[in-house]
Amino acid sequence: MPTEPLPAVPAATPEVVEIERALTRITYLSTRARQHERLMALAGVPLDRAAVALLRQVADSEPLRPGELAQRLGVEASHVTRTVQQLQKSGYVTRVPDPDDRRAQRIELTDAGRAAVDRVRDAGARGMQLALGEWEPEELRQLATLFHRMVDDFLAYAVEDEPGQETAETAPPASRPV
């Protein structure tokens, strides 16, 4: 099926260009293998990036079918199947019957999986606290609010016309700072 052409979009403003540059730098820094290894060592969790992404997704939602996980993570279902098998063998997730269709299964965190996600998040937050330690609390609240708003807007724009995709209305609500 051919993809619809994108609507005509005006040239990006200098502010948007700077935001894109900053996001590119953040993405690069946060996805480096060495950074992931350091985070896993601090958390005491021996998992690869795909496994951590899957654990985080399951932790942030109700138990999901593997296909739903693949869709939310933007990967092929076979990748989710392999990662779930790895996490199941390690005791981080379990398969539970789907209450809507007993033939299907959903993926759910175990207590060990919840603890692993908590340790990874704690290690990441502590590292971020060190990096942002000189920022004022109000600046941090503003940044968090703007990041959540940006993510919500990205979700609303990116999946507007894609059937079965998560939208800002169907996505789990972002936890906004108070």
Image (cartoon, helix red, strand yellow):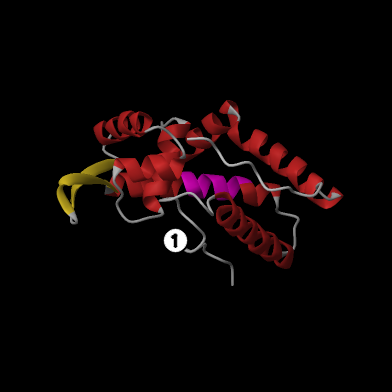
For the stretch drawn in magenta, what is the main secondary structure? helix
Side of 14 where 4 appears, left or right? left
Image coords of residue 132 (percent x, y) = 70, 52
Q: Secondary structure at mark 1?
A: loop
Which span is picked out in magenta?
Answer: 120-127
Kindly indicate the quadrant of the structure image that contains residue 46.
top left
Q: Nearer the viewer, residue 5 or 70?
A: 5
* Residue on which the image places disc 1: 170
Viewer can see residue 136: yes
Viewer can see residue 44: no
Q: Is residue 10 a member of the stretch shown in magenta?
A: no
Q: Residues within 10 Å of mark 1 (few under 14, many from 20)?
A: few
Kind of residue at badge 1:
Thr
Image quarter in which the C terminus is found: bottom right
Q: Nearer the viewer, residue 60 or 171?
A: 171
Image coords of residue 68 (percent x, y) = 35, 45
